[in-house]
Amino acid sequence: MRRRAGLPGQLLNHDALKEQYGIDRAAAILSPGSAQADPLLLCWWLLTIAANRKARIIDADAIHFHDEGERVVVETTGPHVVEAKHVVLATGYAMPHFIMPRQHEIRSSFALATVPQAPERLWRDGALIWEAAEPYSYMRLTADNRIVIGGEDEDISDPQERDAMLGEKTQMLRQTLARLIPGADPTVSHAWCGAFGETSDGLPLIGRVPGARHVYAAYGYGGNGITFSYMASRMIAALMKGEEKAWFDNFALDRPDFSES
Ligand SMILES: Cc1cc2nc3c(=O)[nH]c(=O)nc-3n(C[C@H](O)[C@H](O)[C@H](O)COP(=O)(O)OP(=O)(O)OC[C@H]3O[C@@H](n4cnc5c(N)ncnc54)[C@H](O)[C@@H]3O)c2cc1C
């Protein structure tokens, strides 16, 4: 199916996977072109680039939006009131209530980081690993050779309920790590959990906010923030220029929710 869709990748059978990566699973797909970034550093640099290009950055929460025809007025918790020709809402899982579409759900996700590993305990090339199982798990390495493993999602959004599950979930992730990479030191140095939002159809919510002419939204990326945020930047810039494409409808905030039928 991947080949038919034009996606490159190499199928590793059980023996090749065991021999090359030390992972004892039925098979795997080795894909080229993946990347990882430190999200905090990435955000700081993007903000620095924007500031160097004369963007003004205001450190405050936006609390009210008023669509006044040719301009949008944004009230903040600080002394600033921002007037703009276009406003893009991109507040992550904290969506303003007036755009929260039905197909968006908040779940919970869990992760841990081990102590730094000796290089010989790790798998080849620092590959980014995704196990497409139920529950799924993912693994990657930090710059100081810690293994980060995450997954074990739950259909809960209450932060206290989520925090209460952290101990049990950390043990489950440790067991998954021991099964996948038996040579690794499973000693945990950090464990955490947080909200994870996704849509019922797996597609993001990108486009105009229904009923507001100059307000746009970019939400619902699920685990695909890198891909969907890039798409959002292209789509919303095009919409602001008045360039509409038929396929934008697939991502519209008011698209039908087929999960209910
Ligand atoms: C556990 C986990 C693992 C993930 N793994 C991956 C991965 O491997 N690859 C990948 O591509 N994606 C991954 N994602 C998804 C990715 O992190 C998100 O899609 C991405 O961070 C969303 O970016 P954003 O800018 O839309 O929102 P956010 O990163 O949530 O940023 C929104 C910002 O808006 C601020 N904000 C909120 N309300 C207001 C307000 N009223 N006024 C002003 N500011 C406000 C928030 O404080 C926040 O700083 C993962 C997500 C989770 C939770």
Image (cartoon, rainbow, N blue to C red):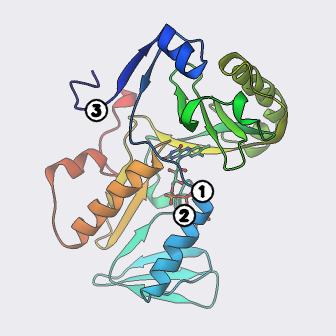
Which residue is tagged 3?
7
Kind of residue sitting beneath label 1: Asp
Q: Is residue 238 above or below residue 108?
A: below
Kind of residue sitting beneath label 2: Leu
Q: Observer-nearest residue: 123 or 247?
A: 123
Q: Looking at the rendered structure, which numbered label has been put on residue 38?
A: 1
Residue at image point 75% right, 20% down: 175
Left/right of residue 193 with respect to residue 140 in the rendered view: right
Which residue is tagged 2?
42
Mark 3: few/some/many CA within 10 Å (<14, 14-19, 20+):
few
Count of numbered circles on the image: 3
Helix, strand or loop at disc 1? loop
Left/right of residue 177 with respect to residue 31 in the rendered view: right
**x and y percentages locating residue 225 in the rendered image:** 47, 50
**x and y percentages locating residue 251 in the rendered image:** 30, 48
Gap between marks 3 and 2 measured at Cα: 27 Å
Q: Looking at the rendered structure, which numbered label has been put on residue 221?
A: none
Gap between marks 2 and 1 measured at Cα: 6 Å
Q: Quadrant of ligand 1?
A: bottom right
